[in-house]
Image: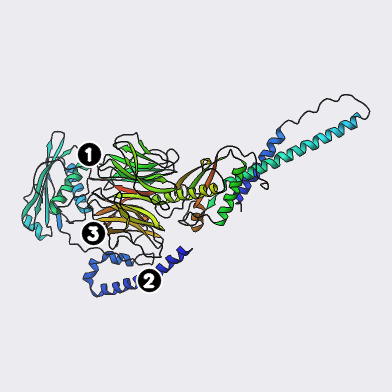
């Protein structure tokens, strides 16, 4: 009861934000140019919930990029499908503003300065050649601003129709992103998630672009919290197949799961340490839920990480250095996100206002090491936030629908999350530009987990890059 | 106290048990030793008393079946919780005290307690919350002298809602502990259970 009243009090204080939003709208009318930069803020003001939450996204300049038609000995359809995948990957990377390659025929001499005039800072040139067992894709990235080649290489792709074909093309696209920006891409990756069916929840895996959805478990029971091993070859997860939540692990190609822990009580929320051998998870100790480590190498040896006693600790997320982890604990009443090192003491990093009930869960540590994303309850719904792992002010990332369970992409820039927006589903958010795209739409999607990079481009010759 | 569904289940159980009793063949009276003048009258009186005893036995059996069924209902009555809480309110405590009494007088009974949460909040956190709820129930019963080895607990988090829907009432019904008898029979229903 007191909780509800407190929440009501915080609702009242948010009306100031509404006034601020109205003020923002007025200033937008005065400075139309500002309006373009503040589209996400405008979207915030249109929130049908009536409570305005301000989102602040960088108005990042996105260099123009054009992917020219590939010259090829292969069939036109094949060539266009490969170019289409690469073009979409570059678009989804949210680092470029894509230009149409209109009025160009394949095989024409490339006029880079002309493309610069037409708004392309980068020009991608591609050639497909047949090779034994597949095709060779030669890519060249022209920097139109400096008039030089920024990177080039030849990528061996399997035959179209091969199960690894799309992933190999994604890996080539990731290489283009790296040439252009020096940063890793995210196209050669997949997303594991839970989908609720009739009376059961099973784990599925989809490519990062929503293609190639495959069912992973068929236990006919409740299956939760898939976690990728750092090499992307295994998933650990929780299954109720024996009646109580136990921790299992399975290779991607295998149909046999290995039992890791079925201690009395619950065995939930696994997270592989970067070494791939230690798995942190939450289990029941003396009536409380505590974090422990299971050692894969030795197939045993529970090592307790937390001793909350009267409190619960769960949902660990390792830092990429494996020295620290974020987790959820309710030692302040409601669940909050903490960071600690094994043997150290927990440090609160999620927003906490003294005397107010708050509910922050599902942390995930960015693979680039600097941010922890989590879900925070605001006005009875959940919104994504990100906070510097070192502590500091949290940034609000979403304000449409209820949004939960963020998981970072390998590029450390995008997060996938489960949302009730637009009829529900899994969505991908670019934490830099604020752009959101649907991954899979529908009801019953949850607990997405983004894989590590699954394929390195097989580059035959390469030059350039950063 | 009881929902109409629970009540009708109870009535059905009582009815079914009564019906079972009736189908049992009545005990055959021993053959009369001698046939005299008033033997017919005596035989009638004897038959009457046999019938009365039979009826009494049936009534007792029905009542005892009802008491057992009622005890079973009390043992498996759900206990509900406030949002994001595993505190036992006075109604929950009352129900658990009754369970403790039944468990005490029927030491063979084993119970499974499942903690459940409503759909709001983190799926994973709700598993921990459900475990806390089940644990709160077990430790309450423990304080009433019930050995914790007789009570197996687990959590389903928000995975098994009792009622579908996203209303306050659905949430309230879904925040609960469920009880299942996993071993033993109720042989000694508490007084006042019928």
Question: Is A26 on the left or on the right of A290, as rendered?
Answer: left
Check disc 3 and report its element: helix, strand or loop.
loop
How far apart marks 3 and 1 lie (CA) works out to 30 Å
Disc 1: which residue: A164
| Rendered position, B106 above or below A59 | above
Measured from the top left, where is residue A450 in percent x and y? 28, 48
- In the image, taking residue A405 as reference, residue B5 lies left or right, namely right
For marks 1 and 2 on the same chain, the one whose residue lies earlier in the sequence: 2
Q: Residues within 10 Å of mark 1 (few under 14, many from 20)?
A: some
Task: Point out residue A88 in the picture as x, y percentages from the top left corner.
Answer: 21, 50
Residue A376 makes an appearance in the image: yes
Numbered disc in front, either 1 or 2: 2
Which residue appears at 33% of the width and 59% of the height?
A: A350
Residue toward you, B73 or A404: B73
- Asked if residue B148 lies left or right of residue A362, the reply is right
Q: Earlier in the sequence, mark 2 or mark 3?
A: 2
Rendering coords of residue A52 (x, y %): 35, 67
Residue that numbered label 2 is attached to? A15
Asked whether disc 1 touches disc 2, contact meaning CB atoms under 8 Å apart, the reply is: no
User: A463 or A327, which lies in front?
Assistant: A327
Residue A393, by quadrant, is: bottom left
Q: Could you give the CA–CA distance between mark 2 and mark 3, rounded to whole angstroms?
A: 27 Å
User: What is the secondary structure assignment of the residue under circle 1?
Assistant: loop
Residue identifier under label 3? A432
Q: Chain of mark 2?
A: A
Gap between marks 1 and 2 measured at Cα: 52 Å
Label 3 marks which chain's residue?
A: A
Question: Reading the chain from its start, which is encountered first: label 3 or label 1?
Answer: 1
Where is residue A102 drawn, in percent x and y? 14, 54
Subunit under mark 1: A
Q: How many marks?
A: 3
């Amino acid at each position: 009861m007191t909780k509800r009243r407190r929440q009501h009090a915080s609702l009242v204080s948010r009306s100031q934000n509404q006034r601020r939003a109205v003020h923002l709208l007025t200033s937008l009318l005065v400075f139309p140019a500002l309006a373009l930069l503040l589209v996400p803020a405008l979207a915030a003001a249109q929130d049908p919930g009536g409570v305005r939450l301000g989102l602040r996204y960088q108005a990042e300049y996105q260099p123009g990029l054009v992917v020219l038609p590939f010259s090829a000995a292969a069939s036109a359809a094949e060539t266009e499908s490969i170019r289409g995948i690469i073009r979409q990957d570059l678009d989804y990377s949210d680092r470029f503003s894509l230009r149409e390659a209109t009025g160009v025929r394949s095989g024409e001499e490339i006029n880079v300065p002309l493309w610069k005039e037409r708004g392309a800072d980068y020009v991608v040139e591609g050639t497909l050649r047949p090779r034994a067992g597949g095709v060779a894709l030669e890519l060249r990235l022209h920097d139109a601003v400096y008039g030089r080649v920024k990177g080039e290489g030849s990528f061996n792709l399997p035959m179209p129709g091969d199960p690894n074909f799309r992933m190999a093309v994604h890996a080539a696209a990731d290489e283009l992103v790296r040439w252009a920006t020096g940063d890793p891409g995210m196209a050669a990756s997949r997303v594991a998630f839970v989908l609720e069916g009739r009376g059961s929840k099973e784990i599925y895996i989809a490519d990062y672009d929503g293609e190639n959805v495959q069912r992973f478990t068929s236990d006919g029971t409740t299956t939760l919290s898939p976690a990728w091993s750092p090499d992307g070859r295994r998933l650990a997860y929780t299954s109720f197949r024996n009646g109580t939540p136990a921790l299992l692990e399975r290779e991607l190609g295998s149909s046999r799961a290995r039992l890791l822990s079925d201690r009395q009580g619950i065995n939930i929320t696994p997270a592989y340490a970067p070494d791939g051998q230690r798995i942190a998870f939450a289990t029941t100790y003396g009536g409380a839920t505590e974090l422990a480590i299971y050692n894969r190498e030795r197939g045993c040896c529970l090592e307790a990480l937390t001793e909350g006693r009267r409190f619960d600790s769960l949902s660990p997320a390792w830092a990429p250095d494996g020295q620290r982890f974020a987790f959820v604990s309710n030692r302040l009443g409601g669940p909050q996100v903490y960071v600690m090192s094994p043997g150290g003491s927990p440090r609160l990093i999620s927003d906490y206002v003294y005397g107010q009930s708050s509910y922050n869960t599902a942390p995930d540590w960015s693979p680039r090491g600097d941010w922890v994303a989590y879900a925070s309850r605001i006005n009875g719904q959940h919104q994504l936030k990100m906070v510097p792992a070192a502590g500091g002010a949290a940034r609000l990332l979403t304000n449409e629908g209820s949004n939960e369970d963020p998981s970072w992409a390998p590029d450390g820039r995008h997060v996938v999350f489960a949302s009730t927006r637009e009829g529900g589903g899994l969505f991908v958010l670019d934490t830099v530009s604020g752009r959101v795209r649907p991954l899979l739409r529908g009801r019953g999607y949850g607990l997405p987990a983004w894989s590590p990079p699954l394929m390195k481009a097989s580059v035959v010759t390469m030059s350039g890059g950063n | 106290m009881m929902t109409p569904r629970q009540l009708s289940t109870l009535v059905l159980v009582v009815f079914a048990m009564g019906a079972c009793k009736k189908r049992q063949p009545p005990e055959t009276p021993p053959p009369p030793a001698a046939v005299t003048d008033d033997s017919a009258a005596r035989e009638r009186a004897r038959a009457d008393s046999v019938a009365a005893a039979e009826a009494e036995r049936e009534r007792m059996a029905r009542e005892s079946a009802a008491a057992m069924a009622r005890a079973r209902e009390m043992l498996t009555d759900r206990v509900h919780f406030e949002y994001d809480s595993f505190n036992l309110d006075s109604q929950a405590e009352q129900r658990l005290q009754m369970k403790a009494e039944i468990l005490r007088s029927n030491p063979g009974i084993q119970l499974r307690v499942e903690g459940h949460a409503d759909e709001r909040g983190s799926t994973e956190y709700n598993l921990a919350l459900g475990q806390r709820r089940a644990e709160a129930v077990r430790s309450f019963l423990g304080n009433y002298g019930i050995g914790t080895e007789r009570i197996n607990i687990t959590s389903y988090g928000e995975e098994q809602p009792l009622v579908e829907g996203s209303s306050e009432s659905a949430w309230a019904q879904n925040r609960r502990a469920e009880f299942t008898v996993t071993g033993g029979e109720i042989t000694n229903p508490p007084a006042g259970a019928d």
